[in-house]
Amino acid sequence: MSLQHILLGILQEPKSGYDVKKMFDEIFSNFWSAELSQIYPQLKKLADKGKLSIFEEASNKGPNKKVYQTTQQGIEDLVAWIEQGPAVHTERHAYLAQTFFLNSLDATEKKLEFMQSLHQEMQQWHQQLSHTLEQAKKETDNFPYDLPDEQFYPLLTLMMGVKKVGAIVDWCQEATELIKLRL
């Protein structure tokens, strides 16, 4: 999966770099993370390649802000990426790499603290995703069948996030219990 392709998809509607970051934090966090330090250089590269247009818009908090929007060339690139088929086996989970190397910690108590902290973090994330899904259900009669495409397909990613993070919560609980047996 490419950050550039995600940006092209997000920017089909005009947004500032800050608005893009907000979407990553609020919507995409269950499958992709990006910092402003990654986003802005990619926005510049896409604009330099003619895949984004940039214009200025008045801001109520100081100077004008840059607003980005996907060009026709950018949409064609996004569509070509999707038509290549699913990009699989690209996930990276730092917490799993950390778990893999937990044996580097001397004390089993520290290993347990790590896993309990991960468990708590995942529980909170699962609650947030579940709450967002429940709100979406309340807002639409005959949910999800009457949703327009621009809401239906993002909903599918939210549903996956709820299931995936729920499974991680279960795994954290199981791993915590197994570590406790090693005390």
Image (cartoon, rainbow, N blue to C red):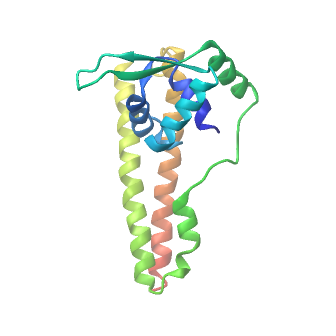
Residue 125 to residue 142: above or below = below
Choose between 31 and 2: the one closer to the eye: 2
Q: Is residue 6 left or right of residue 65?
A: right
Tell me what residue is drawn at x 55 percent, y 80 percent: 103
The quadrant of the rendering that contains the C terminus is bottom left
Residue 176 to residue 131: above or below = below
Quadrant of the rendered structure where residue 140 is?
Answer: top left
Question: Where is residue 60 drawn, in percent x and y?
Answer: 23, 21
Tell me what residue is drawn at x 59 percent, y 15 percent: 71
The quadrant of the rendering that contains the N terminus is top right
Q: Give the residue at the far right of this rendering.
A: 84
Quadrant of the rendered structure where residue 26 is?
Answer: top left
Residue 114 visible to the viewer: yes
Residue 68 to residue 89: above or below = above
Tell me what residue is drawn at x 49 percent, y 67 percent: 174
Choose between 57 and 10: the one closer to the eye: 57
Question: Where is residue 30 drawn, in percent x and y?
Answer: 49, 43
Residue 35 visible to the viewer: no
Question: Where is residue 151 drawn, in percent x and y?
Answer: 48, 20
Q: Is residue 79 left or right of residue 146?
A: right
- Figure disc tally: 0
Tell me what residue is drawn at x 40 percent, y 23 percent: 66
